[in-house]
């Protein structure tokens, strides 16, 4: 299938045969692996389009093309902060070996987060080119300087499921207008977690998760996508070893 379209009413981009939705990934965080997988079934001379919001891709992607023998076609502005990049597959034999090497390297990949604080419980976390403030392990006030550790965990779970669904839906060619996640959770024995009782379980209690989706797609397609996302979600899969965590996906 060949695709041609014109962003924002401008001049049309060249024909392309496949699309990768890169989102905010940079080339060092998995984007190249996704590109290589999408490029593998294409014939030499066919074009892959990569849609990305990550600025560093503009420099890293052309350099990668030169290194592995693909042709850099160009870049076009897309909606919002998105840029459309196009790469024409070369005829060299480097790609299968490079893909295997990347797959092997990914098996042992580990994320790194650094955290530091002064005498109070509030601190700052650092990961790659990001930093953010963190609050106390548990906090109940309506206004705080920073989210608590539990709130960070729940927000990470919400982002994993919500963003994971949007990315998987795009890969399957499904239209999703909005995704919104709501998670509530308690602690089984909160007084134990606060060291106000000598016994009890400080585990998180039942989690209630609802993902609201605005989409014109049929319910079976949404359900199949949701099941795939849940099956491949690291945080959800880890928490489910200790807790029963049903996830409700609701079309609105």
Image (spheres, rainbow, N blue to C red):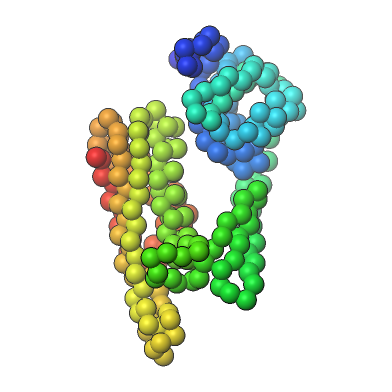
* Residue at the spot 44% in from the left edge and 32% down from the top edge: 171
* Residue at the spot 64% in from the left edge and 18% down from the top edge: 74
Position of residue 66 measured from the top left corner of the image (x, y, whole percent): 74, 24
User: Where does the N terminus fall, quadrant-wise?
Assistant: top left
Q: How many tags in the picture?
A: 0
Residue 67 is at least partly visible in this image? yes
Frontmost residue, 68 versus 58: 58
Image position of 149 with respect to 225: above or below = below
User: Where does the C terminus fall, quadrant-wise?
Assistant: top left
* Residue at the spot 66% in from the left edge and 28% down from the top edge: 58
Residue 43 is at least partly visible in this image? no
Frontmost residue, 150 versus 17: 150
Q: Is residue 3 left or right of residue 25?
A: left
Question: Residue 162 lies in what quarter of the image?
Answer: top left
Position of residue 27 measured from the top left corner of the image (x, y, whole percent): 64, 37
Position of residue 13 measured from the top left corner of the image (x, y, whole percent): 54, 13
Image position of 205 with respect to 226: above or below = below
Q: Is residue 77 left or right of residue 101?
A: left
Q: Is residue 141 left or right of residue 44?
A: left
Q: Residue furthest bottom?
A: 198
Frontmost residue, 194 versus 30: 194
Position of residue 70 measured from the top left corner of the image (x, y, whole percent): 68, 21
Q: Residue furthest front?
A: 143
Q: Residue furthest right?
A: 67
Image position of 10 with respect to 224: above or below = above
* Residue at the spot 33% in from the left edge and 53% down from the top edge: 182
């Amino acid at each position: 299938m060949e695709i041609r379209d014109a962003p924002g009413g401008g001049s049309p981009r060249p024909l392309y045969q496949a699309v990768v939705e890169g989102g905010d990934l940079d080339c060092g965080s998995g984007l190249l692996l996704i590109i290589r997988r999408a490029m593998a079934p294409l014939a030499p001379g066919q074009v892959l389009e990569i849609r990305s919001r990550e600025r560093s891709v503009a420099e890293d992607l052309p350099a990668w093309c030169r290194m592995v023998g693909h042709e850099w076609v160009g870049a076009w502005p897309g909606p919002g902060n998105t840029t459309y990049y196009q790469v024409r597959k070369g005829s060299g034999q480097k790609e299968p070996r490079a893909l295997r090497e990347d797959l092997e390297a990914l098996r042992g990949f580990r994320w790194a987060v650094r955290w530091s604080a002064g005498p109070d419980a509030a601190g700052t976390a650092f990961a790659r080119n990001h930093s953010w403030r963190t609050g106390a392990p548990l906090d109940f006030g309506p206004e705080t300087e920073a989210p608590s550790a539990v709130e960070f965990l729940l927000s990470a779970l919400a982002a994993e499921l919500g963003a994971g669904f949007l990315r998987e839906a795009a890969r399957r060619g499904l239209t999703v207008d909005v995704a919104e996640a709501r998670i509530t959770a308690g602690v089984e024995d909160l007084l134990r977690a606060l060291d106000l009782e000598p016994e009890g379980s400080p585990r998180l209690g039942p989690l209630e998760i609802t993902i609201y989706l605005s989409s014109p797609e049929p319910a079976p397609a949404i359900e199949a996508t949701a099941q795939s996302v849940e099956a491949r979600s690291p945080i959800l899969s880890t928490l489910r070893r200790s807790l029963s965590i049903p996830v409700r996906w609701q079309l609105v």
